[in-house]
Image (tube, rainbow, N blue to C red):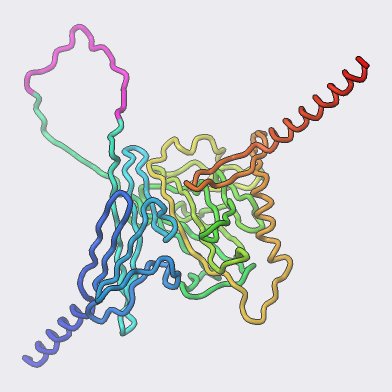
């Protein structure tokens, strides 16, 4: 019996040592610093989905692996940002994966909460009290209740044939995939989702809008998000790549609403959904929005050995570029061309206005020439 107890104690000690020390998370307004002690049997540490992506690797000194995550350009290494629409409080989080020598894995959730520097003032209308109003001298409070809804956590995953695409594997352009966006188990009964905007980028100088106001710009490449149970959003799409890289990063803005978000009817007759099962006209997506979440998912797309670049596959990115050149608004407003500035702000250029100005200039020149001819 004593021998059995000794063996159990040795097992517990080995398990404790193998797991290593706890990670340390430090936050500032600009940076989230995550320090992972590489003790025990820990072998490597990396950000979830970014195992082989060189720009997001930690700095290793001695037995410490340190991640410096930029909170100003949080999307570059897949940090998720959550903005509370009521308080303007911002939360940032990411998963750090730690692999041991025996193949076991640990997951550390690194999270920072940044409060706004200045608290906004809300002015409310005041109502005059009636003349016979009397406030009691003593208030008898018998019960006090306080309730807080959980802060939502969102996750995105890409699947092939219903199975998550391995982090270290790549898919061929044209492969049929699905993207799933979902809430954590605690938040799912409270909130609903609506994907408002999404774009794809090569992580450097190229990016193309995929979803605008809940509607896909090119359904042959990326369908609208749909839902069957209200807690999971799913969109079918075909893998594509940019010419100069194998990495494609999808960055989306998701509205999180109490109970459910209003759905959207797109201009081509298709329907895009948040947490809503029946058809609805997109009227005011901000009506019950309480959070805005910016999340990122990463995908490696490359040609396999022996594959050829078929024209229909290469046409996918060309069609998306063409769709980005003319973003049609279903209510009849002029078409626009979208660009991103260095501070990541979306700028729309009115192409119809440019054509109108050119026409006016041409007509003016013709009128001037005709006038001079008549005078002459």
Give left or right: position of 74 versus 341: left
Establish if 270 lies above or below 62: above
Establish if 41 lies above or below 120: below
Q: Is residue 137 magenta?
A: yes
Q: Is residue 191 visible?
A: yes
- Where does the magenta region start and end? 121-138
Residue occupying the point 54% across, 45% down: 278
Residue occupying the point 49% across, 41% down: 262
User: Which quadrant holds residue 351?
Assistant: top right
Residue occupying the point 18% across, 11% down: 133
Front residue of this view, candidates 184 and 156? 156
Q: Position of residue 73 (x, y in %)?
A: 42, 53
Quadrant in the picture for the C terminus: top right
Q: Is residue 275 visible?
A: no
Q: Position of residue 284 (x, y in %)?
A: 50, 35
Look at the magenta stretch and give its main secondary structure.
Answer: loop
Establish if 78 lies above or below 301: above
Q: Position of residue 176 (x, y in %)?
A: 61, 67
């Amino acid at each position: 019996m004593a021998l059995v107890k000794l063996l159990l104690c040795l097992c517990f000690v080995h398990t404790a040592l193998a797991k290593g020390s706890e990670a340390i998370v430090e936050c500032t307004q600009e940076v989230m610093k995550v320090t992972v002690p590489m003790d025990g049997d820990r072998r490597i540490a990396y950000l979830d989905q970014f195992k082989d992506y060189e720009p997001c690797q930690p700095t290793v000194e001695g037995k410490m692996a340190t991640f410096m995550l930029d909170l100003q350009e949080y999307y570059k290494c897949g940090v998720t940002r959550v903005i509370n629409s009521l308080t303007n409080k911002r939360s940032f989080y990411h998963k750090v994966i730690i692999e041991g020598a025996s193949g076991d894995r640990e997951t550390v959730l690194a999270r920072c909460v940044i409060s706004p520097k200045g608290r906004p003032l809300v002015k409310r209308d005041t109502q005059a009290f009636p003349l016979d109003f009397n406030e009691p001298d003593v208030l008898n409070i018998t019960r006090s209740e306080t309730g807080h809804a959980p802060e939502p956590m969102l996750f995105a995953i890409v699947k092939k044939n219903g199975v998550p695409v391995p982090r270290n594997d790549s898919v061929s352009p044209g492969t049929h995939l699905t993207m799933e966006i979902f809430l954590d188990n605690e938040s799912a009964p409270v909130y609903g989702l609506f994907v408002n905007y999404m774009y794809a980028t090569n992580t450097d100088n190229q990016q193309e809008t995929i979803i605008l106001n809940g509607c896909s710009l090119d359904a042959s490449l990326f369908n609208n998000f749909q839902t069957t149970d209200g807690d999971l959003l799913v969109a079918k799409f075909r893998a594509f790549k940019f010419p100069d890289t194998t990495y494609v990063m999808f960055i989306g803005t998701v509205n999180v609403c109490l109970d459910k978000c209003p759905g959207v009817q797109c201009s081509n007759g298709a329907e895009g959904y948040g947490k809503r099962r029946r058809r609805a006209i997109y009227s005011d997506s901000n009506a019950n929005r309480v959070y805005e979440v910016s999340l990122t998912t990463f995908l490696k797309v490359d040609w396999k050995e022996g594959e050829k670049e078929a024209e229909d596959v290469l046409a996918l990115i060309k069609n998306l570029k063409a769709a980005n050149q003319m973003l049609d608004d279903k209510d009849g407003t002029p078409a626009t061309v979208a660009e991103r500035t260095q501070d990541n702000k979306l700028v729309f250029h009115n192409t119809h206005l440019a054509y109108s100005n050119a026409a006016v200039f041409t007509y003016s020149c013709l009128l001037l020439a005709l006038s001079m001819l008549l005078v002459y």
